[in-house]
Amino acid sequence: MNVVGRSRDIVVHMRNGGVIPPERVRTLFEPFHAKSAAPAHSTGLGLGLFISHEIATAHGGDITVESSVAAGGTIVTVRLPRTENASAEGFNHPASDVPPPAPHRSSG
C-alpha cells in the first residue's frame, strides 16, 4: 500500500499480485456483480466495491482499478480531495504523478 498526501487530495494505491480479467474489471463497481463471480462458499453480497465507489464519489473522489500482467497485478487507486465542500464535478486532479506501490517480491 502507498499513501500520498498532496495539497489538493490524498491518493491511496493498493496492489496485489492477482490479475482480474478485463470483463470483470468493467463491472467491479456494479452492485451484485462480484457475488455472481465469487466462489460458491462466499458469503458476501457483492456490494462492498459498489458502496466504496459511491462513498468516494459522494466526497468528490474516485476509485479506479488497473489489472494486468504489465501493471504487475491489480492496482486499486482511491483519490479523495482535501476540500470541505468537494463535489464530483470539482474533482479533476489526476493522481498520475503518484507512483503505485512496487510489486511484492518473494523472499524465498
Image (cartoon, rainbow, N blue to C red):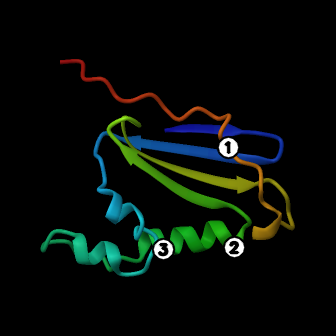
User: Residue 100, how many percent across, how many down?
Assistant: 53, 35
Is residue 18 in view from this perspective? yes
Task: Tell whether label 1 touches label 2 (CB within 8 Å).
Answer: no
Q: Nearer the viewer, mark 2 or mark 1?
A: 1
* Quarter where residue 26 is shown: bottom left
Q: Where 8 sits versus 85, above or below?
A: above
Crowd rating for badge 1 (residues with CA inside 10 Å; few <14, some 14–19, many 20+):
some
Question: Which of disc 3 and disc 2 is earlier in sequence?
Answer: 3
Label for residue 95? Answer: 1
Q: Amino acid at mark 3?
A: Phe
- Please, which residue is most extreme toward the top here? 108
Q: Which residue is at a point 39% across and 61% down the rendered structure image?
A: 25
Residue toward you, 77 or 27: 27
Q: CA distance from mark 2 to mark 3?
A: 12 Å
Q: Which residue is at a point 80% across and 69% down the rendered structure image?
A: 89
Q: Locate the C terminus and report the quarter of the image it occupies.
A: top left
Label 3: element kind: helix
Label 2: element kind: helix
Question: Which of disc 1 and disc 2 is earlier in sequence?
Answer: 2
Q: Amino acid at mark 1?
A: Ala
Q: Where 41 sits versus 98, above or below?
A: below
- Please, which residue is most extreme toward the left here? 40
Label for residue 58? Answer: 2
Q: CA distance from mark 2 to mark 1?
A: 18 Å
Residue toward you, 84 or 35: 35
Task: Tell whether label 3 touches label 1 (CB within 8 Å).
Answer: no
Crowd rating for badge 2 (residues with CA inside 10 Å; few <14, some 14–19, many 20+):
some
Residue 12 located left or right of residue 44: right
Is residue 87 in view from this perspective? no
User: Residue 12, how many percent across, how many down?
Assistant: 58, 45
Label for residue 20? Answer: none
Query: On the image, numbered disc 3 is attached to which residue?
Result: 50
